[in-house]
Image (cartoon, rainbow, N blue to C red):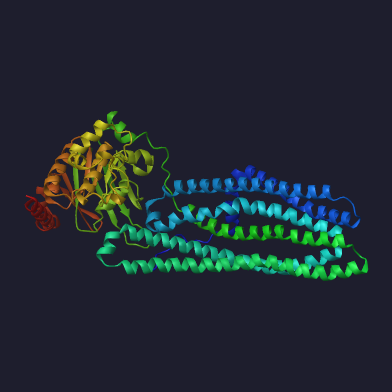
Amino acid sequence: MEPASGPATAVPARLVRRALYAHFRPHRAAVALGALLALIGAASGLAQPLAAKALVDRLGQDEPIAAVLLALTALVVFGTAVEALGSYVLERTAESVVLAARRSLIGRLLRLRLPEVEKTQPGDLMSRITSDTTLLRAVTTQSVVSAATGGLSFVATLVLMGFMDPVLLGVTLGVIVVIGGAVALLMPRIAAATRRSQEAVGEISTVLERAFGAFRTIKASGAEARETAVVEAAAERAWRHGVKSAKWQSLAGSSIGLAVQVSFLAVLGIGGARVASGATTVSSLIAFLLFLFYLIEPVSKLVEAATQFQVGSAAVSRILEAEALEVEETGEAPKAAGAGREGRAAGGGAASVVFDDVAFRYRDDLPAVHHGVSFEVPGRGMTAFVGPSGAGKTTVFGLIERFYEATGGRVLVDGRDVRDWPLAELRASIGYVEQDAPVLSGTLRENLTFAAPDATEEEIRQVLVRARLDGLVERLPEGLDTVVGHRGSKLSGGERQRVAVARALLRKPRLLLLDEATSQLDAVNELALRDVVAEVARDVTVLVVAHRLSTVTMADRIVVMEAGRVRAVGTHAELVAGDELYGELAATQFLAAEAAAEGTRVGTA
């Protein structure tokens, strides 16, 4: 089984170059300093062949050479020290580029709209933050400096070689042009192989994220070998494309040595003939050969810069694809849980909810989930949503939270279209308990205060008692500061559900959304939590998706949904007498849930 890939839209080369410059621009002063130091080091290197020529001339004329040797040694030491300093400056700047890119990408990806997240593999998105941003390190600093210093050094070396012997320079350039043309043909292959390798790395992250997210299921199903094969297949694809990229890069790199070796042989043969004919001197030939070997470094830098640009372009293209995903404009969130915790204290009161002929589908290629859903929920009290699976009950909550946008009609909170609310203010007014009641890795305290970081110890203590978590805290070795494990693995299903409820209550919302919040609770804790919800409903608007009769009958109103429509609205007694579907649900589904709860009660008695 091969996981679906992430975003795959082709990014124009123009946008890639613009993005690369955007990453480079804030650090251009540091890069310029690194380039200056590199040029100084290169200049000291260029002076070494000239010093060597002077040394040979002095030897031929039997003159003192101590001063020349000292100058040559000083040049080597000075050049090495300057190049080391320049390298440090560039490496530090490169890390800063990666940090800035990761900060930007993380901030954007955590604001993605829910539909974008649902159609993209999380592991692939993670690889763009970790793996792809790492490839920016070289392309935005080293490649820029390598191109600049390599280009200048290359031109300067050719000029000096031209002064030494224009004929030998022509021979050298002829060899370089032929081999350089072959190297240019390799660059697109390097870019393509690198991109495929990074995509395969994203696949590894995707399949690992899937595996660790369902670790118990994998073990219970005896599927370790099959899942291992899936991960290994992705790793092999990454290896295959990585090897292909390395092959082309090796060919490009080795071509430099080939060019120099061929040039050396040609220059040595033709230069020897010119020395024999008296057209040039031995010292000039030696200096020319030294320049030829010195030419290796600037040519290597130019090839390296071109290679790094291809590798970096592949990474930037994937980063741009992630940045093109649609995000929510959340704006500035109110302090703490602002509109929720402080808004109620200021007299905000319970929120009203109205669905006015709402239509919705998750994607254009999928069938509609809601077909003209309409109902009204006044402030305060409890409203239960019931109906068969797939009726669109949970989607009601997603539209209120603006996880999704209605494709037709209006969703109103306090008489105001949710699209007109500042998103942070809207969500700060709402407490939401999801169907699977997720618990985050970290301590119990961090989970409870996740939506209300300003909560006091007294508020935490009160909500623990209300959610029947005080006994759990007393049993835990470190109390509230006990680590609950990955996704709350150290807690039972019922405990995770109560943590999620407590987290929502601690937010002190004006509107509380409970999606089957009691489904994993035993009868005793369900009864206690039901009393808490009834108490909260005196001051807060509570909407609950329920499958238990005991939860449904305590509701002030019940909305019966079927196939994406509101079938009926009323009390339990009214609906039992007047709606056939509800009567059937009450007699089968609800009572079955009650029977299961009763069985739990007997089993724990």
Q: Is residue 149 visible?
A: yes
Q: In the figure, is residue 50 to the left or right of 322? A: right
User: Where is 14 relative to 440, above or below?
Assistant: below
Q: Position of residue 278 (x, y in %)?
A: 93, 66
Q: In the figure, is residue 599 to the left or right of 407? A: left
Viewer-closest of 470 and 463: 470
Q: Is residue 363 visible?
A: no
Q: Position of residue 202 (x, y in %)?
A: 45, 60
User: Where is 360 relative to 426, above or below?
Assistant: below
Viewer-closest of 285 and 520: 285
The structure residue drawn at horizontal position 24% and vertical position 59%, both measured from the top left corner, is 390
The structure residue drawn at horizontal position 32% and vertical position 33%, both measured from the top left corner, is 454
Viewer-closest of 52 and 540: 52
Q: In the figure, is residue 468 to the left or right of 347? A: left
Instruction: Specify the quadrant that holds the N terminus.
Output: bottom left
Q: Position of residue 289 (x, y in %)?
A: 80, 62
Q: In the figure, is residue 551 to the left or right of 224? A: left
User: Where is 309 relative to 484, above or below?
Assistant: below
- Quadrant assignment, res 512: top left
